[in-house]
Amino acid sequence: MSLHVQFRVVSTWSQGFQAEILVTNGGQAPMLRWTLCLTPDWQILEIWNARHDGQATQGQALRLHPERPEPLHPGQSSTIGLIASGSPLIPRIRSCWDDGSPPLLQPSPGCQG
């Protein structure tokens, strides 16, 4: 299985920014469930196309899940949007899915499985 994750800043202003996280299934089989774990240096104020477990506060581990429990088919992408306060620094992101495969990006301390 292969889950590709891209973080992109859409716009910025003095106190915050808007960003997108693009998640793409680069594997050969549908992914039934997946999670992104991140530890941002900013605070999420609003999020769409996903739900989160955790405080969504600066420096705290946070788990993002797709808003709808539909499989992500091979080649298919899902975009998570967010508005945050703070500087638009790219967070460390770890991805995981049902088979417990290893991280694709830098691990986020405190955000297990």
Image: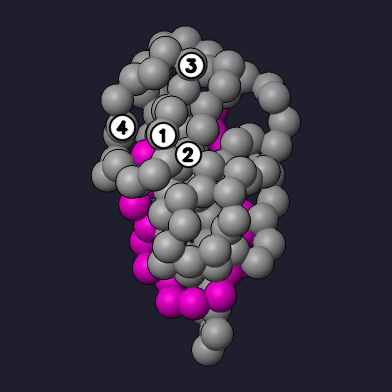
Residue 8 makes an appearance in the image: no
First in sequence, mark 3 or 1: give its number.
3
* Residue that label 2 marks: 36
Residue 89 picture quarter: bottom left
Q: Amino acid at mark 4?
A: Pro
Q: Position of residue 17 (x, y in %)?
A: 54, 74
User: What SS does tag 3 mark?
Assistant: loop
First in sequence, mark 4 or 1: give its number.
4
* Residue that label 3 marks: 98
Contact? badges 4 and 2 (CB < 8 Å):
no
Cα distance, mark 3 to mark 2? 12 Å
The residue at the point 39 percent across, 44 percent down is 110
Crowding near the residue tagged with mark 4, few <14, some 14–19, many ≥20 C-alpha atoms within 10 Å: some
Residue 105's place in the image compared with 44, above or below, is above
* Residue that label 1 marks: 112
Residue 100 picture quarter: top left
Which residue is farthest front? Answer: 110
The numbered dot on residue 103 is 4
User: What SS does tag 2 mark?
Assistant: strand
Cα distance, mark 4 to mark 1? 11 Å
The residue at the point 67 percent across, 43 percent down is 51
Cα distance, mark 2 to mark 1? 10 Å
> What segment carries the magenta color?
73-94
The quadrant of the picture occupied by the N terminus is: top left
Indicate whether residue 60 is drawn in magenta.
no
First in sequence, mark 4 or 2: give its number.
2
